[in-house]
Image (cartoon, rainbow, N blue to C red):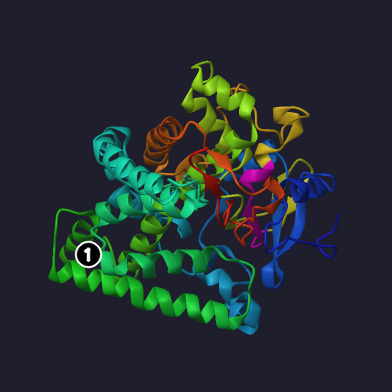
Amino acid sequence: MTASSRVAIDPFGVDIPAESARLRALGPVVPVELPGGIPAWAPTGYDALRSLILDPRVSKDPRQHWSLWPQLGEHPDWGWILGWVGVINMLSTYGPDHTRLRKLVAPSFTARRTEAMRTRVEEITEELLGKLAEAGSSGETVDVKAGFAHPLPMQMICELFGVPEHLHDDTGRLIAAIMDTSDPSPAHAASVQQQIGTVLPALIGYKTEHPGDDMTTELIKVHSEDGDRLSDEELLYTLLLVIGAGFETTVNLIGNAVVALLEHPDQLAAVRAGEIGWDAVIEEVLRVHPSIASLPLRFAVSDITVEGVTIPAGDAIVTTYAAAGYDPEHYGPDATSFDARRGADDHLAFGIGVHRCIGAPLARMEAAVALPALFARFPDLALTWKRDELRQVPSFIAYGWQEIPVRVTS
Ligand code: HEM
């Protein structure tokens, strides 16, 4: 394939496994177009993705390493990408800047620190399950995403960052707008920028006036003590990243696991019987239905050749976690099927290398509390829509369901 015959990525992410297969048939690294026509390279298999992520010649800093960065303003439909690469935080930095920004937050999310949050996760879980039981007590359909999978991680991250109740809804709307890649219009991009410019300053303002025992207060302190360690912009965008990544991804992990188990009653029965562990379920969901299907963007610092394809210096690369999970050469011919007995614990759904997810222990712990509690509380839990009626969130980045209608009692 040549760079002139680019394949457009579906901005709605309607059928990510089929799209991954189509791209894989074209080669190990394929020239694609992201929404609005942004050119990028997409690795289509596990090995190609892994080697690119780990390659020190691959950067995440568009300001230094994307040849198209100076021209972004000339393309009105490219503005949406700024919500991803125009923000200055650990996700979009390279080298020492990345190390500095990551160090400010990562120690708060180690496995040990996360374990200390378990009791609170259990309490929120019980509270939400009680409300769900009440709402569905007469056999009504309830949305297990809106009533459980969403509020649990949202409440937890808001407590960790001291986000006051009156900013929860705005925060939820902002992150959903960033994840929505179906509308690359300048109006949508402007709305995202406007929301970033109001919601985060409102949080910083509130926590400056009402400091507490929370991570926003800690970051504000670092910023005011030493602006070199954390500038104004970095404070705002670090909060945006960690709060956003801290709930939206885990919402979809829990939701995707619920649907996968309800769709595979034989595996659910084996889980209930203790023959398959919850950890195995969670890892398989991450492989086959990763909350982040693809992530924009990385950049080639110099020409890089992967499996015979050369990505020229300055070009963009999209990080294709879902495609890696569907690679038949790595996971076999049934790679797109959910099989919790597979034991595929080498998935890349949390990334790998210096940018690997700092929240993986928290996400895993929340799912490991939420899922057994949900299925224990509702032995007759069942989807009330057919699988093909469920709608994917409109995104090629986020991978999850818009709603998950269920019955909680028979
Ligand atoms: C199922 C849940 C989650 C998934 C699938 C997920 C996925 C990922 C992936 C794939 C990356 C790597 C990005 C890259 O290589 O460019 C990443 C990074 C990151 N994640 Fe997560 N994440 C999840 C939960 C969380 C949670 C709960 C938090 C917050 C506590 C979080 C915070 C972050 C941060 C701050 C980074 C950036 C790290 C860096 O660039 O150094 N994530 N995540």
Whether residue 403 is visible to the viewer of this picture, yes or no, is yes
Q: Which residues are magenta?
A: 313-323
- Report if residue 93 lies within the magenta region: no
**229 to the left or right of 224:** right
Q: Quadrant of the N terminus?
A: bottom right
**165 to the left or right of 298:** left
Question: Residue 133: percent from the left, percent from the top?
Answer: 39, 44
Q: Is residue 375 above or below residue 107?
A: above
* Residue in the picture at 46% in, 77% down: 193
Question: Residue 293: percent from the left, percent from the top?
Answer: 61, 49
Residue tagged 1: 223
Quadrant in which residue 4 is drawn: bottom right
Quadrant in which residue 185 is drawn: bottom right
- Report if residue 320 lies within the magenta region: yes
* Residue in the picture at 65% in, 37% down: 325
**340 to the left or right of 375:** right
User: Farthest residue in the front direction?
Assistant: 138
Secondary structure of residue under mark 1? helix
Q: Is residue 277 above or below residue 81?
A: above
* Residue in the picture at 51% in, 39% down: 352
Q: Is residue 204 above or below residue 392?
A: below
Question: Residue 146: percent from the left, percent from the top?
Answer: 46, 55
In the foreground, 232 or 243: 243
